[in-house]
Image: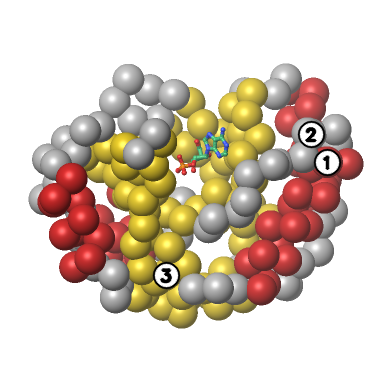
Amino acid sequence: MRLFVGLDFPWETKQLLASLAGGIPGARWVPPENYHLTLRFIGEVPAHDAEEIHHALAALRARAFPLVLAGMGTFAKGGQATQLWVGVERNPLLEALRNKVEIALQRTGCEPERRRFTPHITLARLREPAAGKLVGFVQSHNLFRAGPMPVQHFFLFSSRLGKEASVYTPEVEYALH
Ligand code: 2AM
């Protein structure tokens, strides 16, 4: 199964984010039920490893924290924007959680994550978007803020790749303290 560790958001937050969607030709907007923040992408693992990963995450102790969503950004490949996302305010407790997850996963044998942690919620995937519209969109929403909202759990998600959109399922919920 294909797995990742992340945060889920209340329906009101997803609705608020969904209200931002629209107005960029060529954008494929993420369905609101799919909004999440990835703490650590794991990828395809056999069921036996998934079990071990679950035990490692269940043993992890980390603090609950308030999270503020703030600003927008894009990821690009080869000079071409590929993703539009909402960011979060700098948050040492979020980073501490992410680091604990990373350590727990490495102990189970996962390869270290080499990418820098850029916490984000993907709003849209982009294919040759009208560049001017994208820049305008990001600029007009640059002051977007939501929260603070309490983060009291994190999740092990499974991901099934679909034709239209992937299906993300929170498989296990882990409490923060
Ligand atoms: P994204 O939203 O920035 O694309 C499920 O696919 C989640 O894991 C998504 O949040 C996705 O991030 C992230 N993800 C997918 N493939 C990844 C990879 N190779 N490395 C890091 N994160 C990945």
Which residue is denoted by mark 1 in the rendering? 106
Asked whether the residues under the numbered discs 3 and 2 touch, taking CB atoms below 8 Å apart as contact, a structural biologist would say no
State whether residue 62 is above or below residue 18.
Answer: below
Tell me where residue 94 sits by quadrant.
bottom right
Give whichever of 67, 119 is nearer the camera.
119
Choose the circle earlier in sequence order: 3 or 1.
3
Q: Secondary structure at mark 3?
A: strand
State whether residue 20 is above or below residue 102.
Answer: below
Q: Quadrant of the N terminus?
A: top right
- The location of residue 104, given as percent across then percent down, is 82, 48
Which residue is denoted by mark 3 in the rendering? 69
On the question of residue 55 being in view, the answer is no
Specify the color scheme: secondary structure
- The location of residue 164, given as percent across then percent down, is 29, 26
- The location of residue 99, given as percent across then percent down, is 75, 57
Which residue is denoted by mark 2 in the rendering? 110
- The location of residue 112, given as percent across then percent down, is 77, 40
